Image: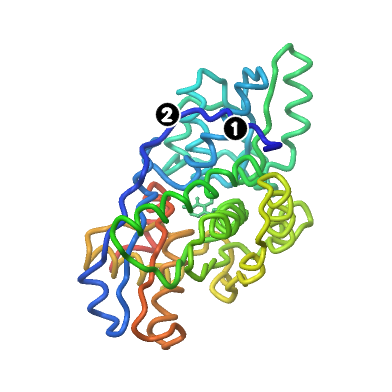
Amino acid sequence: MGVSLDKFKLGFFPTPLHGLKNFSALYPGYKVFIKRDDHTGLATGGNKTRKLEYLIGDALAKGADTVITGGAQQSNHCRQTAAACNMAGLKCHLLLGGDSPGEHTGNLLLSNILGATIHYTGAQRKGEDMGLLAGQLSAKGHTPYIIPYGGSNIIGAMGYFEAAGELKTQLDQKNLKIDYIFFASSSGGMQAGLMLGKAMHNLGATLMPIRIDKQETEGKSLEDNIRDLVLEGIHTLDIQDTTSLDSTPMIRGYEEAGYGVVTRHEKEAISILARHEGILLDPVYTGRAFYAMMHHMEKGLLEAGTNVLFWHTGGIPANFNYAENLIDQ
Ligand SMILES: Cc1ncc(COP(=O)(O)O)c(C=O)c1O
């Protein structure tokens, strides 16, 4: 394999897989299950833990002493990167969009508690200036390692390539067949990893990636980014049978309000799952993707009599930043 396999253990795996009995009763004709990557364990968990095991492993293998990454102020990726750096003995610099806020809540509060050095970057919320900062740190004698926006390069994607195999093993053990897998897709690394892992591990489910953010990253569409990652992965992993790789269309339409804008849809999804199953979603990613899944079942857009899986990717701390959008008035 052409990418580093130096993995640094950060989380607790396999994450639980279980049924949502009370919630499923609301949608006759469907049985709904959940994969709990909100329980990966890294400073309140989330999907980036799987990517960071490979990225931090690579940073250490390359002799880095400092990690740089970027995102929005409520970035789950940045919060988990700060925690991962502490476990690995690395310094962490975060480039966060916007200006220094009056109040620190949610992920931003946690990134502060975790001790990351935070740089506020105004309108740029996807780490556009990471290269510049790396140059400055190198000039001061540091060895920086840049983790791209969302941890979405081929190294990070390996975390979800592996996760597809983890899910396949769990399904085999439970003698369970899943027909659809819904998840939030934003910077694309999770989706690319799952697409590659699905092909490699014969995971016979249809992937249902819900687009969260309509803004491009560095002038490249999410679809192009994923396509390039998948092509790189086919080569890196030497995947021979690529037939199932073409069949993952991005599901659009739920991101129209904009990134991080919480509407009644996200609120409805969060409150339904919380009140039927005692499980918390987040307002930016999983709330949006879970609403999309509910909408698909409600409208009969999925084949009747099927098993549907929601892949919970974490993000719980962001709820605290959106209290006004989430409480019943
Ligand atoms: C909670 C949560 N879910 C899903 C995603 C999307 O994952 P990806 O960026 O790999 O598409 C993110 C990304 O930040 C996230 O924080």
Instruction: Single out the residue that lies furthest toward the top.
Output: 141
Please name which of the two marks, 1 or 2, marks the residue nearer to the observer.
Answer: 1
Q: Residue 17 appears at what percent x and percent y?
A: 31, 55
Q: Position of residue 213 (x, y in %)?
A: 60, 62
Disc 1 packing (10 Å; few <14; some 14–19; many ≥20): some
The residue indicated by pointer 1 is 5
Amino acid type at mark 1: Leu
Residue at image coords 48%, 53%: 164
In the displayed image of the protein, which residue is found farthest to the front? 240
Q: Nearer the viewer, residue 63 or 114?
A: 63
Q: Disc 1 versus disc 2: distance between alpha carbons?
A: 30 Å
- Tell me if mark 2 has few (under 14), some (14-19) or many (20+) residues whose alpha carbon lies within 10 angstroms of its own: few
Which quadrant holds residue 59?
Answer: top right
Left/right of residue 81 with respect to residue 21 in the rendered view: right
Badge number at residue 113:
2
Would the CB of label 2 be found within 8 Å of ligand 1?
no
- For the point 22% across and 59% down, which residue is it? 278
Identify whether 62 is placed above or below 226. Answer: above
At numbered mark 2, what does the secondary structure look like: helix, strand or loop?
A: helix
Q: Looking at the rendered structure, which numbered label has been put on residue 186?
A: none
